[in-house]
Amino acid sequence: MTPETAKPLVKICGLRDEHTIRGMQGMPVDFVGFVFAPSKRQVTAEQAAGLLKAVSEVTMKEGRRPRAVGVFVDPTMEQLAEVLDQAPLDVVQLHGRETPAFCREITERFGVEVWRALPADAEHEDGALGLTGTDRLADYEGIVSAVLIDTAGGGTGRTFRWDLIPAYRDKAQAHGLRLFVAGGLTADNVTELISSYRPDGVDISSGVETDGSKDLTKIAAFAERVYRT
């Protein structure tokens, strides 16, 4: 991303109903996320197929169709094949102990883009690589297109230490990776994040919910705040 001109990409994750997706018509949203890992936001492949039909019928700001991201934790190739056969995702986002070799195999076998999510805490070891902090990114060069850093545990609704972001951003750029930031984001704090740290993208789920359900007013506020920052 060129900090002076490019807008961070926006991903709204954890979507579970067609009404919300259709209600996002015209919003500056680039990616919509569906959770296939165990979670209160989990969807089945069959449900995702219906949601993707709704995605195909909406147009975001500037005439774009949002791209669909599936969130998985330590899936098998067979599980991925079952989902992708019914729900043709654009991106597979991995949150477990998946190795670079596993990520590469996904792209080669299914022809989808792969993102790797990592806990931002520099002291947390990546079990797949035995590395900590930004050192983990080098082994994903040329294999995944983006790295997403999040609060350890993921889906916690809590922010991590944002002062860690510059080191991740610099390392991601050095290895040709886009950097997404997640964890505790809201319309109230995303302007500070973007102004201070300029990630390539932002990912939000609980921050655009009310009583556990996606809130179109909050989604619109968040996406517009990013677009106008």
Image: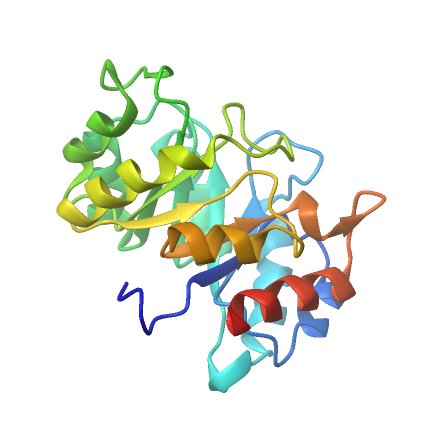
**Could you tell whether 204 is left or right of 218 in the image?**
left
At 69% from the left and 73% from the top, the residue drawn is 22
- How many numbered dots are placed on residues in this image? 0
Q: Is residue 22 left or right of residue 8?
A: right
**How far from the left and from the top, in percent, is residue 150?**
47, 35
The structure residue drawn at horizontal position 64% and vertical position 44%, both measured from the top left corner, is 43
- The residue sitting at the bottom extreme is 63
Query: The N terminus appears in which quarter of the rendering?
Result: bottom left
The quadrant holding residue 41 is: top right
Q: Which sits in the foreground, 156 or 160?
A: 160
Residue 135 sits in which quadrant? top left
**Horizontally, is 163 left or right of 20 in the view?**
left
| Left or right: residue 91 compared with residue 186 | left
Residue located at (53% from left, 53% from top) = 192
Residue at 21% from the left image edge and 39% from the top image edge: 105
Q: Nearer the viewer, residue 17 or 202?
A: 202
Instruction: Please say whether residue 12 is visible from this viewpoint.
Output: no
Residue 203 on image: x %, y %:
52, 50
Q: Is residue 162 above or below residue 87?
A: above
Is residue 108 in sight in this rendering?
Answer: yes
Judge whether 136 appears above or below 228 on screen: above
- Residue furthest right as drawn: 211
Q: How is the image coloured?
A: rainbow
Instruction: Give the x, y percent position of residue 191.
Output: 55, 58
